[in-house]
Image: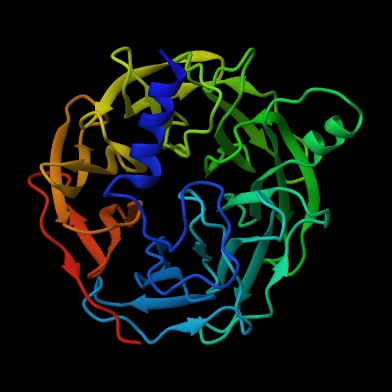
Amino acid sequence: MPTLILLLLVCASAVIAPGAESSGHGAGHAHAAGPSAANDLRADAAFDANGRLWMVRHQAGFIEVRSTRDLGRNWSPPVRVNAQPEEIDPGGDARPKILPTLDGKLFVSWTRPLAKPYTGEIRFARTVDGGRSFETPRTVHRDQAEITHRFDSLALDREGRLFVAWIDKRDAVAAAASGRSYRGAALYFAVSSDGGATFAGDFKAAENTCECCRIALTPSPDGGVLALWRHIFEPNVRDHALAHLKPDGSVGKMARATFDDWRVNACPHHGPSLACDERGALHAVWFTATESGGGRAVYGRVMPGASPEAIHPLGGRLAAHADLALAGGKIVAVWKEFASGSNQLRALVSSDDGRSWRDVTLAESAGPCSQPRVLNHQGRMFAFWNTGTGPAVIPVNTADSPTRGTTSKLSP
């Protein structure tokens, strides 16, 4: 595939299509000089153990958290995570993250850009009082060089330990200083065993990762977490790799997980999503090139070192930024897609462990929108989507037809 055509496709689907997030920035790596405008639609959401839904987003230099007890009909007033304004990385895959714990804590992370282009640091804050206030944010990693530490991801393992993973370029910088070539970046992580009070790290999981795609983390049945990320295989193939990140900082053997043979000297800005079912099988969604010269999101069951099984395409040629969740044989993938003049929120649904599927449209937006999330709360599935009219929480009926959810404008 000609590189120029593919790069145009990547830009159209990732950052400048009508469905792209509105963050007040240019595409990809650009950094603004001051706090973002109040139209940053990138957001994350998660249910706590009591069914309360928490949302985090970036507004005019502040990371703010809100919650709803009625699936988005009413949202609480915002609680600022950072007392002083901070910039947030403008990358499409660089939304802020939120993660509730079983004992009532909330963890929030984001990437703050630094003065030099493409550089950043991973910021973290927690609340231990039910979301009424946050402790002073701090930088997770020990390395304080003005280099790339970007595209953070959060996950709890089955024992409640917190993992933070990110894309890191310290090895690329060291290689350049010694005159050696180096492909891409690296994946590093830190671990907290005391509820986010302290972190051990920095631990290196892999070298030669793609530079601007989000990392997928999911709890491993063997403790720790499993990581899926876009890797750069020789000579320049942007497929995905899988590895087991362990609480002591060690890493299981890295294995290739997708074999699409996508050869492109550019970052697609489309990270994967990963989930593990009750039997230990791994399910994923990811974005890849097609034989016709386009690109699309797909679902499949991934295995270390083997080609994925049960591959199923998601939507049409502009299907992108998919997310995935599982519950008791139910599989739901959501994505956004520009079609018929509007941004569409769509879902692929299976209630029988992938033996049959339904492809449905959940919502539409005439204006900008965020990357969607699919959320599981006690076996019930919901799509979360932030648009110019407010965040939408949309129940996904895994048995029949999906129903419309609630979109609400947020008060200041």
For the image, the number of numbered tags is 0
Residue 138, position as x, y percentages in the image: 72, 70
**Residue 81 image-quadrant placement:** bottom right
Q: Could you tell me which residue is drawn at 77 percent across and 59 percent down? A: 199
Q: Could you tell me which residue is drawn at 27 percent across and 36 percent down? A: 319
Q: Could you tell me which residue is drawn at 46 percent across and 48 percent down? A: 27
Q: 218 and 140: which one is in front?
A: 140
Residue 401, position as x, y percentages in the image: 7, 46
Residue 84 against residue 150 in the figure, above or below: below
The outermost residue toward the left is 401
Residue 164 against residue 386 in the figure, above or below: above
Residue 337 against residue 44 in the figure, above or below: above
- Residue 397 in sight: no
**Residue 394 image-quadrant placement:** bottom left
Q: Quadrant of the N terminus?
A: top left
Q: 4 and 44: which one is in front?
A: 4
Scheme by which the image is coloured: rainbow
The outermost residue toward the right is 178
Residue 76, position as x, y percentages in the image: 35, 84
- Residue 185 in sight: yes
